[in-house]
Amino acid sequence: MKRGFIYILSNKKRNTFYVRVTNNLKKRIAEHKSGIGSKFSCKYKLTDLLYYGEIQGFRKAIDREKQLKNWDREWKINLIKSINPDLKDLFWDL
């Protein structure tokens, strides 16, 4: 079964969040950091990885992505802080 990664990016001010799914987390975040991520993430300078989680089954990962996108901002912040209370960029720990 193919795995997927849910991830949440933010900018330095932590005022915009970007929820997505990928099958290669390191590569995808490196793309965002180098400016070749999505147009949205480039426009808002969303380069800091604040949250990620591995999910077995890519379809399940996509379903989780859709769920998180519909969450209130406060819920997303609480989810992020559950594993990253300091809101630091987790990319360098991968």
Image: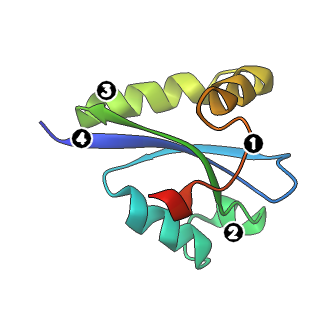
The CA distance from mark 2 to mark 4 is 26 Å
Q: Is residue 92 above or below residue 36?
A: above
Amino acid type, residue under disc 4 in the picture: Arg
Amino acid type, residue under disc 1 in the picture: Asp
The CA distance from mark 1 to mark 2 is 24 Å
Q: Quadrant of the N terminus?
A: top left
Q: With 48 as the anchor, is 22 left or right in this view? A: left
Determine which residue is flagged by label 4. Answer: 3
Foreground disc of the pair 2, 4: 4
Residue at 53% over, 22% down: 67
Front in this rendered view, residue 83 or 53: 83
CB-based contact (under 8 Å), mark 1 and mark 2? no
Determine which residue is flagged by label 2. Answer: 42
Front in this rendered view, residue 20 or 52: 52
Tell me the quarter of the picture where residue 54 sits: top left
Foreground disc of the pair 1, 2: 1
Amino acid type, residue under disc 3 in the picture: Lys
Q: Is residue 49 above or below residue 1?
A: below
The CA distance from mark 1 to mark 4 is 27 Å
Residue 86: mark = 1
Task: Tell me the SS state at disc 4.
Answer: strand
